[in-house]
Amino acid sequence: MDGMGARLAADSSVSEVVCSFTDITEHKRAEEELRASEERFRNAFAHAATGMALTDLKGTFLEVNRAFCQITGYTERELAARDFPSITHPDDLPRNIDLMRQILAGIIPSYVIEKRYLQKNGGVVWVRISVSLLRDSKHQPQHMIALVEDITERKRAEDALRELSGRVLQLQDEERRRLARELHEGTAQNVAALGMNLGIVDQASAALDEGARKALSESVALANQCIRELRQKLGELPQFEERGVRIVGKVALREHAQT
């Protein structure tokens, strides 16, 4: 009921009452839907498997869920007395602050960053954070909400892959050098000496019968062919190494993707 008025008779007694009513059913329904929506959000926030944090515009934690506490090692009460810079690795903080400045200035609507958190027990955890800005009814920045995923295992796998790739490169280089040394100092020189000896014998082949001269000539040709092929292979060794790196890299990446 919006209002009520009374009309008085001559003797000052109430002769009639006038009331006005407004239907506020839709208004009440909207309020109920808003409360239900907020309740669903809070339930989703509290029980989400992904870490979630609500901060003010300075980065101070206002609300965090259980998953976020598990990632950082802090309790909800401990985090309420902290801000995100205090638990961010110093090397990752400048980039994070720059992105926060951009989102508050309206340059970007949101951002995603991979960085390290400093846990309560002194450990370091890698996280992937998606940050969005929450605005009030007047479209003014009010809070920031962050979705936080623990990617420590993925980072460890990437580090292991880089270490493996470096080791493969080292082993390939060592094998290339060994093979080149053996071919140059052993096989190539032996074949070259064989070719020289066959050449000397070929110069004195007049005393041989026709069959022997033919066999000798073929042997000289084969020796020269072996020398040319060995020189070609020695020149191709860096190409073998590069091809091997590509193959090993593809195999390692495929195995990592499957894990």
Image (cartoon, rainbow, N blue to C red):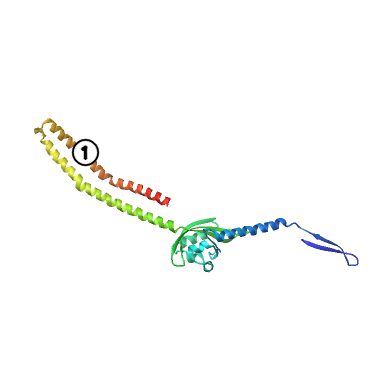
- Residue to which mark 1 is pinned: 225
The secondary structure type at the circle numbered 1 is: helix
Mark 1 closeness class: few <14, some 14–19, many ≥20 residues within 10 Å: some
Three-letter residue code for mark 1: Gln
- Residue 19 location, x and y as percent? 81, 60
Side of 136 where 91 appears, left or right: left
Q: Residue at x 25, y 42 (%)?
A: 232
Side of 169 where 135 appears, left or right: right
Q: Residue at x 37, y 55 (%)?
A: 162
Please say if 248 is above or below 88.
Answer: above
Q: Quadrant of residue 226?
A: top left
Q: Please state which of residues 48 and 227 is positioned toward the viewer in this rendering.
A: 48
Q: Can residue 29 be seen in the rendering of this structure?
A: yes
Please say if 196 is above or below 211.
Answer: below
Query: Which residue is the extreme one toward the top?
Result: 210
Q: Residue at x 13, y 33 (%)?
A: 213
